[in-house]
Amino acid sequence: MKRIYSGGEFEAKIGYCRAVVAGGFVHVAGTCGQGEDVTAQCRDALRIITGALEEAGATLANVVRVTYMLPDRAEFEPCWPILSAAFGDTPPAATMIECGLIDPKFRIEIEVTAYIG
């Protein structure tokens, strides 16, 4: 098993790591990005996730499951073009949940699972 840390502020506060590689899968923790609006945060979260996947030997093409969490479901649709471009011809199974996030400044949190065999 391999643990991957990104140095995010909540990793130490809460006691988790960005990703864990185990049993042929890469489990990436829920990830919030920085930015002024949901689309900027979505892009940044994908950047952070991509970095964790690369450290694990994977890419977004390996993602088999994604969960999107937003405090306002109306903000999900502006993210669709970004997500469609990110996952391209290898879209994962997906779920979107409307819920509160750890800090009101966050507009989207993304969690993925990738398969690397």
Image (cartoon, rainbow, N blue to C red):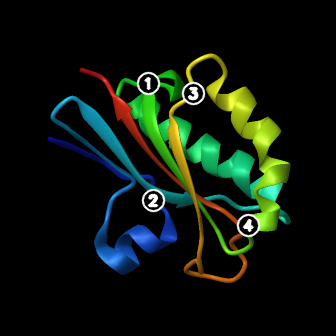
| Sequence-wise first label, 2 or 3 | 2
Q: CA distance from mark 2 to mark 3?
A: 28 Å
User: Considering only vertical position in the picture, is 48 above or below 114?
Assistant: below
Do the residues bearing badges 4 and 1 touch, measured as CB atoms within 8 Å?
Answer: no
In percent of width and height, residue 63 lies at 45, 31
Task: Tell me the SS state at disc 2.
Answer: loop
Q: CA distance from mark 2 to mark 4?
A: 29 Å
Task: Please give the residue where the numbered disc 4 appears in the rendered image.
Answer: 73
Task: Tell me the SS state at disc 1.
Answer: helix
Task: Please give the residue where the numbered disc 2 appears in the rendered image.
Answer: 7
Question: Residue 109 lies in what quarter of the image?
Answer: bottom right
Closer to the eye: label 2 or 1: 1
Task: Please give the residue where the numbered disc 3 appears in the rendered image.
Answer: 91
Query: Measuring 53% from the left and 28% from the top, which residue is drawn there?
Result: 60
Closer to the eye: label 3 or 1: 3
Do the residues bearing badges 2 and 3 touch, measured as CB atoms within 8 Å?
Answer: no
| Sequence-wise first label, 4 or 3 | 4
| Sequence-wise first label, 4 or 1 | 1
Mark seen at residue 62:
1
| Sequence-wise first label, 2 or 4 | 2
Q: CA distance from mark 3 to mark 1?
A: 9 Å
User: Considering only vertical position in the picture, is 34 above or below 83?
Assistant: below
